[in-house]
Image: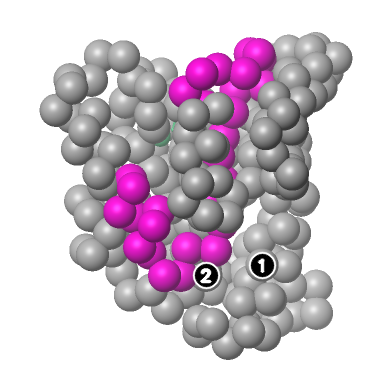
Amino acid sequence: MIIHSAKYLISSPSFDKCPPADKPEYAFIGRSNVGKSSLINMLTGQISLAKTSATPGKTQLINHFIVESSTSQKNKQQWYVVDLPGYGYAKRSQTDRRRWEQMIENYLRKRPNLLQVMVLIDSRHVPQKNDLEFVNQLDKWEVPFSLIFTKADKEKPGVVTRNVQIFLDTLKVTWQFLPQVFITSAQKKTGREDVLLFIEQNNLRAAENEMIG
Ligand code: GTP
Ligand code: MG
């Protein structure tokens, strides 16, 4: 995939205020500070498209970006990237947390063009309770998702592989099918081609099915 442009579009407080559902959409979500904004910038090749910060809990709205790309066969594609506010931010009030849950649940379950949720997991850690709870929730809602392990440059490859394996083993206890997995580093651009190819294939499938666009 070749990215031609990526632009910020709009930040929406709820799913019904989002832009027209007329393009394939990929939403990025995960714990606060897991590296969502950094990954979006790395994938789109724009250093400061999504705001990154060392202070967690910055993103509070549904942030839409529009991307124009083309496949190796020169087919043009237009798709949305969504940067969602992270979960598990300790300093958030109970009321804010509930508001977040409502907004996220509505968006994830009601957005018709949402093709895939990319759940980001910090590759430095063994499975965390809120990550496992979140993917189990997605499974119950039947929302399609993939796992993207982030910050792979910060640990030895052996540690990353082991953490990914433990996460999948934990899911295997109750699940029949495992999601697609990507290992990435925003800093070293690891995994960029794989994630973009996955998006390209989903875009093509959506166009074939004439679901959208
Ligand atoms: P919130 O929107 O606040 O929830 O955070 P986020 O998930 O968007 O994380 P963000 O991209 O802002 O990154 C958080 C911190 O981790 C920043 O200091 C980034 O520079 C750092 N970071 C993100 N990805 C990587 C990575 O792949 N490698 C390294 N070394 N640092 C990373
Ligand atoms: Mg962010």
Q: Which amino acid does label 2 sit on?
A: Pro
Can you give x and y, in whole percent of width and height, for residue 199 in the image?
66, 61
Can you give x and y, in whole percent of width and height, for residue 65 in the image?
42, 58
Q: Which of the two discs, 1 and 2, labels the residue nearer the N terminus?
A: 2
Q: For residue 191: magenta?
A: no
Task: Give me the residue at 47% from left, 40% from top.
Answer: 137
Vertical comparison of 71 with 144: above or below: below
Residue projecting furthest to the right: 158
The residue nearer to you, when weighing 186 against 156, is 156
Can you give x and y, in whole percent of width and height, for residue 63 in the image?
34, 51
Span of residues in magenta? 104-131
Local SS, label 2: loop
Task: Give me the residue at 67% from left, 34% from top.
Answer: 174
Residue contact between numbered discs 1 and 2, judged by CB atoms under 8 Å:
yes
- On the question of residue 108 being in view, the answer is yes
Residue projecting furthest to the left: 95
Residue 59 in which image quadrant: top left
Local SS, label 1: helix
In the rendered structure, the answer to whether residue 7 lies left or right of residue 74 reads left
The residue nearer to you, when weighing 51 against 173, is 173
In the rendered structure, the answer to whether residue 45 lies left or right of residue 49 reads right
Residue at mark 1: 202
| Count of marks overlaid on the render | 2
Q: Which amino acid does label 1 sit on?
A: Asn
The alpha-carbon separation of the residues under discs 1 and 2 comes to: 8 Å
Vertical comparison of 162 with 76: above or below: above
Vertical comparison of 109 with 101: above or below: below
Q: Give the class, few, some or many, for how many residues have Cα within 10 Å of label 2's Cα (few <14, many ≥20).
A: many
